[in-house]
Amino acid sequence: MASAFIKYEGNTPRNRIMEFLVTFAVEDDYSMMDIAKHSKVSYAALKMILKEFVKERRVSFTRNVGKAKMYKLNAQNPIIKKFIEYYWKIIEQETEEKRSVDYHVQSVGMASTQHS
């Protein structure tokens, strides 16, 4: 099932990578293989996109672990800071809308059983 962000912005490799990074790689770093796996993006596509993200300073290289290069979201970048706020605002809005719908369904369900 797609997240609120993916539903709103579209199911593209870039969006799936950014979603993973915002959700997990603000504090921790991940290898390219892990980012590809968790983002459900091919390694070849990730390699190309990650090169762009590093150039744009969305992502930063942190260290080498053996042969693996580790990366994390560049939370110091002002644009990325705004993107993180935007991402969580979409998630928050979806959560509030779902709660509102659930409450309405429960209220209607209770009212219909009381009138039976």
Image: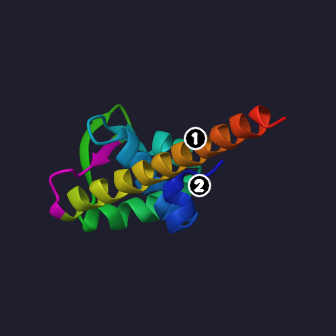
Q: Position of residue 45 (x, y in %)?
A: 53, 62
- Give the extent of the magenta segment: 70-78
Left or right: 94 in relation to 112: left
Q: Give left or right: position of 69 versus 38.
A: left
Say which element carries label 1: helix
Count of numbered badges drawn on the protein: 2
Residue 12, position in %: x, y? 55, 65
Q: Which of 43/85 is in front?
A: 85
Q: Separation of disc 1 and disc 2 at Cα?
A: 40 Å
- Residue type at the position of mark 1: Tyr
Residue 32: numbered disc: none
Q: Residue at the spot x=36%, y=63% of the render? A: 51
Q: Residues within 10 Å of mark 2 (few under 14, many from 20)?
A: few
Q: Residue at x 52, y 65 (%)?
A: 8
Instruction: Using the image, tell me which numbered label, if any, was put on residue 42.
Output: 2
Q: Residue at x 15, y 62 (%)?
A: 78
Residue 15 colored in magenta in the image: no
The answer to whether residue 4 of the structure is visible from this angle is: yes
Residue in front for this viewpoint, 103 or 97: 103
**Residue pictured at 36% horizontal, 48% vertical:** 22
Label 2's element? loop
Location of the C terminus by quadrant is top right
The residue that disc 1 covers is 103
> Can the viewer see residue 68?
no
Where, by quadrant of the figure, is residue 103 drawn?
A: top right
